[in-house]
Amino acid sequence: MREASESVREIEVQWGDLDSLGIVFYPRFFAWADEGAHQLFRAAELPMDRLLAERKMSFGLVSSAAEFHSPARYGERLLSRSTISKLGGRSLEVTHRLVRVADESPVATVRETRACMDLSDPARIRAQQLPQDVASRLRRFEARAKVVEGE
């Protein structure tokens, strides 16, 4: 089993991703981060739909923040590199670093905090302890401490 890894996906900036200035409209970065988190969970063999159906649990977003390093424009290809930057008892932090495919220059960093949620009773949604098997699978995607240029 890998000690540390990341989930990587490529994004091509589309016309509908742009604002009136011709650069990526900031909410698109949050949507891409959410897609990246779901891909990371699938890579960890923990797809959200299966967690909900089989275990009545999910990972709800409780906070999100972004830093924008440089604008992205129509047609550019970006890589979204998603890692678990912090794994706690009831929550985790996912960091998504978006860089240009062409030169790896930083475009944005989005951090999400997600709580492990017990959804067995829809009237009483609450945070729960990460099950050991889930934590073990997610641990494979923990980032090693490193300095990232541009942050």
Image (tube, rainbow, N blue to C red):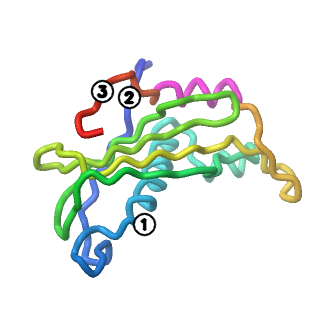
Which comes before the other along the chain, label 2 or label 1? 2
Q: What element does badge 3 sit on?
A: loop
Taking the magenta stretch, the answer to whether it contains residue 139 is yes
Task: From this view, report whether residue 102 is shown above or below residue 15.
Answer: above
Q: In this view, does 125 lie above or below 28?
A: above
Look at mark 2 in the image and give the residue it sits on.
5
| Range covered by the magenta-colored residues | 131-140
Image quadrant occupied by the C terminus: top left
Q: Position of residue 30 (x, y in %)?
A: 44, 59
Amino acid type of the residue tagged 2 in the rendering: Ser
Q: Please name which of the two marks, 2 or 3, marks the residue nearer to the observer.
A: 3
- Dot 1 surroundings within 10 Å: few (below 14), some, or many (20 or more)? few
Disc 1: which residue: 27
Question: Residue at image x 25%, y 66%?
Answer: 13
The residue carrying pointer 2 sits among few (fewer than 14), some (14 to 19) or many (20 or more) residues within 10 Å by Cα, namely some
Q: Relative to 139, is 14 above or below?
A: below
Query: Which residue lies under the disc numbered 3?
Result: 147
Q: Residue drawn at (61%, 51%), measured in percent from left and top?
A: 61
Q: Which comes sooner in the sequence, label 2 or label 3?
A: 2
Q: Is residue 38 above or below residue 132?
A: below
Q: What residue type is labelled 1?
A: Pro
Nearer to us in this view, 131 or 87: 87
- Element carrying mark 1: helix
**Residue drawn at (23%, 77%), measured in percent from left and top?**
21
Residue 113, picture quadrant: top right
Circle 3 crowding by C-alpha within 10 Å: few under 14, some 14–19, many from 20: few
Q: Residue at x 17, y 67 (%)?
A: 75
| CA–CA distance in space, label 2 to label 1 | 26 Å
Q: How far apart are marks 2 and 3 (CA)?
A: 16 Å
Q: Where is residue 86 in the image (x, y as percent from the top left)?
A: 53, 30
Drawn side of residue 67 relative to residue 138, left or right: left
